[in-house]
């Protein structure tokens, strides 16, 4: 049977939905808002606000306050204990443990039937449909799809509620026609011990015909190295000659591009998605641009807080999609069919286009360094580091940055911990080049660095291979969805990692 032809035809029928993201984004958002509001009235959370029907977007904003995990957690806890119709109009039986990027707190977020099938699954199919449109005559269904998820153990309570990583929930509910092509087998994909899982996964997929890989870059690169180690091959394309697509998300891919090109050994297509435990929000719809298309018709209503006026839950200026401005940085606020109402997700983004609405992720609300007025964000640090690695032909595996404060008679500086994938030949040149590129990326840093007036030359620590992985293991976050915080305005995480460096 021509499975690939059938798959191609079916997936191609989704193009009209994707076109609506581009051509009718505001109309799509109004439709999503109306759908969500109908359900909002029926929830205990909605009834608490005693709202009249046919609420406008403005009235909704004026009446329902901004939320974060702390304010919604009591409602989520009650849902976990079996109560129904609290945040969404059904009993919620799936909850995703958010990977998180802080050392102390793991969030447990609701995944409803609506959000799983009409947001996560639907948007994943949209990505493949757009890929087929950009590159016709693909034959992805003829080969296997390697999905590198997080820790897959599911915990079940007495109320029949499942708690686990989003990837585990997704894998457990894949349709049969998708499961036929996914690799490795479920019992390996859902292993909780990442080190055991990495080894078993590599052995299980080494002889498969893999054409797609999907996963977070830092953990995917570890699996690819393990496959090369076991196979004795020099490049991944020797192991999987039909590999053509890598779908990535969760972190900026640019610092890892050199590593992947060397590991794979032949040009393939790279496509980015913006999929988190809270929802699937964006996908790369152009092969020649990394900007992400905002998914405006996927049961998510978006609001945006300008970071220049961000004040947490007390923020006053919140705009809807039609009022965003290109190149302004925003904190993302979402209302979704999983029952997250006006929820500050913690990510920041910047629109690069409003016709259609495309954006890039710039970092996290809490991930910045502004100890000396330099306003350094993740986007600046990764841009400078990527350029430095390009110039000096090196590659990094992970890094983190924090401020260092001296006494009152001395200026402070930034302190970096960097773990190389491939170290530069001249380490001092690496330091000066990175400092120079940071000045180019951030005018405030450049001004504060002038003649060491406010910020001195940075301090660098170069960590042995495996240091960041050991830190993640020590805090119980070793696995395919967990990431190292890039920038922090305090020294807590940096000091923990420093303790692991001889």
Image (spheres, rainbow, N blue to C red):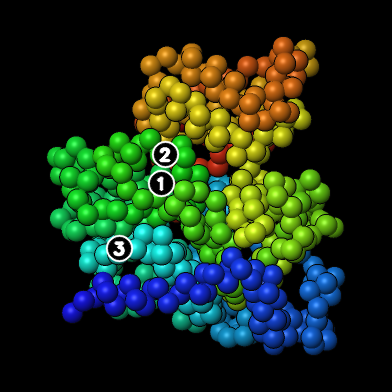
- How much space separates mark 2 and mark 3, taking CA atoms? 26 Å
Indicate which label's residue lies in the foreground, 2 or 3: 3
Q: Which mark is residue 203?
A: none
Q: Which mark is residue 138?
A: 3
Q: Nearer the viewer, residue 273 or 78?
A: 273
Front tag of 3 and 1 = 3
Q: Are marks 3 and 1 in contact (CB under 8 Å)?
A: no
Which residue is at a point 69% across and 86% down the rendered structure image?
38
Where is residue 183 shown, x and y percent of the image?
Answer: 26, 63
Mark 3 and mark 1: Cα distance apart in space: 24 Å
SS at mark 1 in the image: helix
> What residue is at 67 percent from the left and 79 percent from the top?
31
Residue 449 against residue 417 in the figure, above or below = above
Q: Is residue 71 visible?
A: no
* Residue drawn at the location 53% of the way across and 80% of the way down: 114
- Mark sitting earlier along the chain (3/1): 3
Under circle 3, the secondary element is: loop
CA distance separating discs 1 and 2: 7 Å
Among the two numbered marks 2 and 3 on one chain, the one whose residue lies closer to the N terminus: 3
Under circle 2, the secondary element is: helix
Q: Is residue 64 above or below residue 131?
A: below
Q: Which residue is mark 2?
A: 256
Label 1 close to label 2 by CB (< 8 Å): yes
Q: Quadrant of residue 175?
A: bottom left
In depth, the one of 311 and 11 nearer the eye is 11
* Local crowd size for mark 2, using a 10 Å CA cut-off: few (<14), some (14–19), many (≥20): many
Residue 322 falls in which quadrant of the image?
Answer: bottom right
- Residue 37 in percent (x, y) is at 71, 81
- Name the disc covering residue 217, or none: 1
On screen, residue 351 above or below 417: below
Residue 204 screen position, x and y as percent:
19, 57
């Amino acid at each position: 049977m021509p499975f690939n032809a059938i798959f191609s035809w079916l997936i191609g029928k989704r193009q009209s939905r994707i076109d609506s993201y581009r051509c009718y984004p505001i109309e799509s958002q109004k439709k999503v808002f109306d759908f969500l509001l109908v359900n909002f009235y029926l929830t205990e959370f909605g009834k608490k606000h005693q709202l009249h029907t046919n609420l406008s977007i403005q009235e909704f904003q004026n009446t329902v306050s901004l939320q974060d995990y702390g304010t919604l957690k009591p409602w989520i806890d009650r849902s976990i204990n079996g109560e129904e119709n609290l945040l969404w109009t059904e009993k919620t039986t799936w909850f995703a443990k958010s990977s998180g990027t802080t050392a102390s707190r793991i969030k447990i977020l609701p995944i409803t039937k609506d959000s799983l099938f009409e947001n996560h699954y639907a948007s994943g199919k949209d990505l493949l449909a757009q890929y087929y449109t950009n590159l016709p005559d693909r034959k992805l269904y003829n080969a296997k799809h390697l999905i590198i998820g997080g820790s897959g153990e599911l915990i079940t309570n007495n109320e029949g509620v499942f708690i686990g990583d989003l990837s585990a929930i997704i894998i457990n509910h894949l349709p049969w026609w998708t499961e036929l092509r996914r690799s490795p087998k479920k019992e390996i994909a859902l292993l909780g011990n990442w080190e055991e899982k990495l080894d078993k996964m590599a052995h299980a997929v080494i002889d498969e015909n893999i054409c797609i890989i999907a996963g977070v870059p830092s953990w995917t690169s570890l699996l690819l190295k393990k496959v090369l180690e076991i196979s004795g091959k020099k490049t991944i394309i020797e192991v999987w000659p039909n590999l053509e697509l890598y779908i990535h998300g969760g972190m900026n891919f640019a610092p890892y591009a050199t590593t992947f090109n060397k590991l794979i050994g032949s040009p393939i297509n790279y496509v980015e998605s913006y999929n988190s435990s809270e929802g699937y929000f964006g996908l790369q719809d152009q092969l020649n641009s990394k900007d992400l298309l905002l998914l405006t018709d996927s049961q998510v209503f978006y609001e945006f807080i300008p970071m220049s006026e961000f004040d947490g839950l007390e923020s006053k200026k919140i705009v809807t999609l039609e009022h965003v401005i290109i190149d302004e940085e925003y904190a993302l606020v979402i209302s979704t069919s999983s029952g997250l109402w006006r929820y500050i997700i913690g990510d920041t983004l910047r629109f690069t286009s409003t016709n259609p609405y495309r954006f890039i992720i710039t970092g996290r609300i809490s991930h910045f360094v502004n100890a000396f007025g330099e306003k350094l964000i993740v986007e600046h640090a990764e841009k400078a580091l990527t350029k430095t690695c390009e110039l000096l032909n090196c590659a990094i595996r992970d890094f983190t940055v924090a401020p260092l404060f001296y006494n009152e008679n001395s200026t402070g500086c930034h302190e970096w911990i960097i773990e190389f994938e491939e170290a530069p030949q001249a380490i001092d040149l690496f330091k000066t080049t990175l400092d120079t590129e940071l000045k180019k990326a951030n005018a405030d840093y450049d001004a504060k660095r002038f003649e060491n007036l406010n910020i001195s030359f940075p301090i660098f620590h170069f960590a042995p291979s495996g240091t960041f992985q050991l830190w993640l293991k020590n805090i119980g976050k070793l696995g395919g969805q967990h990431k190292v915080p890039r920038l922090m305005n305090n020294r807590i995480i940096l000091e923990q990692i420093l303790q692991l460096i001889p």
